[in-house]
Amino acid sequence: MEKVLLDKVQKRLKKLPVHIVRNLQRWALQVESLGIAEVRKISGYHDEPLTGKRTGQRSVRLSKSYRAFYVELDDHNIKLIRVEEINKHEY
């Protein structure tokens, strides 16, 4: 990953509450070890496809308020997951 991009990601993660970063890390580790198809079955994440301007993206809940938006990419028969955004959903 480019250093500039990595620096941006780290800067954004520092602005998030620690428990949200930990939940994101837990989700990412589960995706890595179990695969995205199995992690989608875990009801607590409420993994769902999105519509409208976010068509093609999916979201998972990291807490009641925070969601991570991601896309699935194929790279020579390898599934890649790219987190596009993490934000606080206002209710």
Image (tube, rainbow, N blue to C red):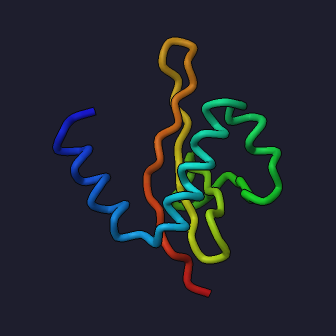
Q: Position of residue 23 (x, y in %)?
A: 59, 58
> Could you tell whether 8 is left or right of 27 in the image?
left
> Could you tell whether 82 is left or right of 12 in the image?
right
Asked whether 66 or 84 is in front, the reply is: 66
Q: Position of residue 7 (x, y in %)?
A: 22, 50
Q: Position of residue 71 (x, y in %)?
A: 53, 43
Q: In the displayed orientation, state which residue is furthest to the left.
A: 4
Q: State which quarter of the image contains the N terminus.
A: top left
Residue name at image x 75 percent, y 44 percent: 40
Residue name at image x 55 percent, y 18 percent: 78
Q: In the image, is residue 71 above or below residue 53?
A: above
Q: State which quarter of the image contains the C terminus.
A: bottom right
Q: In the displayed orientation, state which residue is furthest to the top.
A: 76
Can you tell which quarter of the image residue 8 is in? bottom left
Q: In the image, is residue 74 above or below residue 13?
A: above
Q: Position of residue 77 (x, y in %)?
A: 57, 14
Residue name at image x 55 percent, y 67 percent: 19
